[in-house]
Amino acid sequence: MAFAIKAEVSDPRSKTFAFTAQKTMYGGKHIAEGDTVFVFASENEGGQGLIACGVVISAEATARKRGIIRQTPRVSVTIGRTARAKRPLGRSELKHFTDWNDGQPATELNFKFYRQATNKIVGISDEAAAFLGEFF
């Protein structure tokens, strides 16, 4: 399974990205060393959307806090960049894909990243991974 992360990226040209205690959804908690990851610089944090793809160098689940019953699993990951995006893909390019049942990879990404606009790590389908691969 491939993954995508939308988070604050301080240096989009970096060769490695480190993200601490990131929220996970849609299977994102299963991210592990060696997995393929597509990195989106969060527009909420001044980013531009898809900026890179890479491979997980390390992944470690964040311990849950005591006394809180419902907690979203969080993971800290380090990603080694393998390529930089050659064309844009972000909220503005995906916002028209709103028929949640149409099966298109762009719709899957819009749903997982922008329906609830928080930063997060998500698991993505093989079709969505192939779609994102076209941007490199």
Image (tube, rainbow, N blue to C red):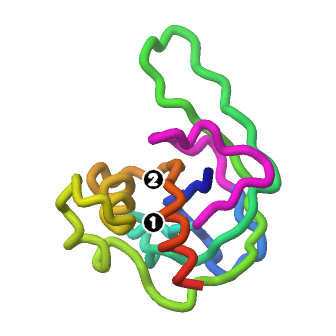
Where's residue 26, x and y in %? 45, 41
Q: Does the image show residue 7?
A: no
Regarding residue 52, the answer to whether it shows in the image is yes
The numbered dot on residue 42 is 1
Sequence-wise, the earlier of marks 1 and 2 is 1
User: In percent of the image, x 38 and y 74: which residue is there?
Assistant: 90
At horizontal 19% and vertical 62% (from top left) the residue drawn is 98
Viewer-proximal residue among 29 and 67: 29
Q: Are marks 1 and 2 in contact (CB under 8 Å)?
A: yes
Is 11 situated left or right of 105 in this image?
A: right
Residue sitting at the far bottom = 86
Tell me where the magenta segment starts and ends, as one range.
Answer: 19-38
Residue at (31% x, 59% y) in the render = 103
Membership of 12 in magenta stretch: no
Q: Which mark is residue 119?
A: 2
The image quadrant that residue 95 belongs to is: bottom left
